[in-house]
Image (cartoon, helix red, strand yellow):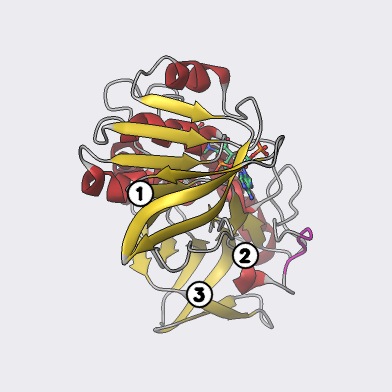
Amino acid sequence: MDKTYDVAIIGGGPAGFSAGLYASRGKMSAVIIEKGKWGGQAGTTEELENYPGSIEHPTGPSLMERMKNQAEAFGTEFIRDEVLGFDLSDKVKVLKLKNGELKARSIIIASGAQYTNLGAPGEDTFRGKGVSYCATCDADFFTELEVVVIGGGDAAVEEAIYLTKFAEKVTIVHRRDEFRAAKSIAEKALANEKIKVIWDTVPEEIYGDGIVEGVKLKNVKTGEITDYRTDGVFIFVGTKPISDFVKGIVDMDAKGYIITDAEMKTSVEGIFAAGDVRITPLRQVITAAADGAIAAIGAEKYIEKTFGH
Ligand code: NAP
């Protein structure tokens, strides 16, 4: 507790790792605090082909491991803990953690976003019993079985492709008649013979007996309800920011995304935000990593101005 870090980075995903790397290379003492798994959402994305240079091992987990190791090599420290609150009454900020306190001259919020729930009946009942939000974590359980993927964005379509490595058949159920996902990803999925797409359709209910046995599907154009037997349901219907712990401290929009300027400054001096947790036109590993670098440089300037070193 005696140590005062130059930068406390909240969140161990691409934004946090990049902030740590840039802070450490700038000879600032930096610590990354993560409450869950290292790597954030990217750490559970198997197919990650759009990060420049990520050709040989284009998977999220391997890229995240390399980013973490790189930050560590330059001196970034890592703590597994949860930030519950702050004392910002002094120039040196105090982060109140579940397991103690930590002092820092500046803070970078890089806590990211997490999946949202679908809200369909049966979703909660069968969570972990056939309902999943993470293909990397659970695909193996569905080897040679049939699964349904809900959603039409990058996550749904990419994870559907990944699931074909395990499952016998993957059915994407999307509420419109075209994907939101990037064209290259969508084309790859449509060309995959293990993937079937049911357009204009939403799940009404997930049912089963102890484990998932099927979904009731509703065609949004005709209103027709059909029964679709399946062994698993993977839900990828968007994300929400992880920002509850800074509510009322930094300015955010109605959805909880943090407002920053181009230098990643929030409404509070010395607190920066980077990556998926902030309002940004693109939420990708590359934008998160770029945000983290900008935030670290901003923190360095702030420390020089405020603490004179
Ligand atoms: P997203 O882009 O917001 O897509 C969510 C999808 O779920 C949309 O297709 C949406 O339909 C559908 N949906 C939303 N609510 C629904 C509901 N109640 N019932 C049925 N369907 C519903 O979310 P995401 O795919 O999780 O991606 C989140 C962010 O991460 C995006 O910025 C994405 O680009 C990024 N990401 C990038 C990559 C990559 O580039 N490698 C991989 C994963 C995620 P509509 O299309 O009709 O709105």
At 42% from the left edge and 41% from the top edge, which residue is drawn?
148
- Residue drawn at x 42%, y 55% is 12
Disc 3 marks which residue? 83
Q: Which mark is residue 232?
A: 1
Tell me, yes or no, whether the highlighted magenta stretch contains residue 252. Answer: yes
For the C terminus, which image quadrant? bottom right
Residue 91 appearing in the image: yes
114 above or below 261?
below
At 43% across and 34% down in the image, what residue appears?
171
Q: Which residues are magenta?
A: 250-254
Q: Is residue 260 magenta?
A: no
Of residue 100 and residue 139, the one placed in the foreground of this image is: 139
Q: Which mark is residue 37?
A: none
Camera-side residue of 102 and 249: 249
- The residue under label 1 is which amino acid type? Gly
Picture quadrant where residue 179 is located: top right
| Quarter of image, res 305 | bottom right
Which of the two marks, 3 or 2, is nearer to us in this view?
2
User: Badge 1: few (under 14), some or many (20 or more) residues near its Cα, within 10 Å?
Assistant: many
Where is residue 159? Give x, y as percent: 41, 36
Left or right: 238, with 27 as reference point: right
Tell me which numbered mark, 3 or 2, is placed earlier along the sequence: 3
Q: Amino acid at mark 2?
A: Ser
How many C-alpha atoms fall within 10 Å of the one at disc 3: few (<14), some, or many (≥20)? many
Name the front one of labels 2 and 1.
1
Label 2: which secondary element? loop
Report the disc number at residue 243: 2
Q: Residue at x 35, y 69 (%)?
A: 80
Q: Magenta region's main secondary structure?
A: loop
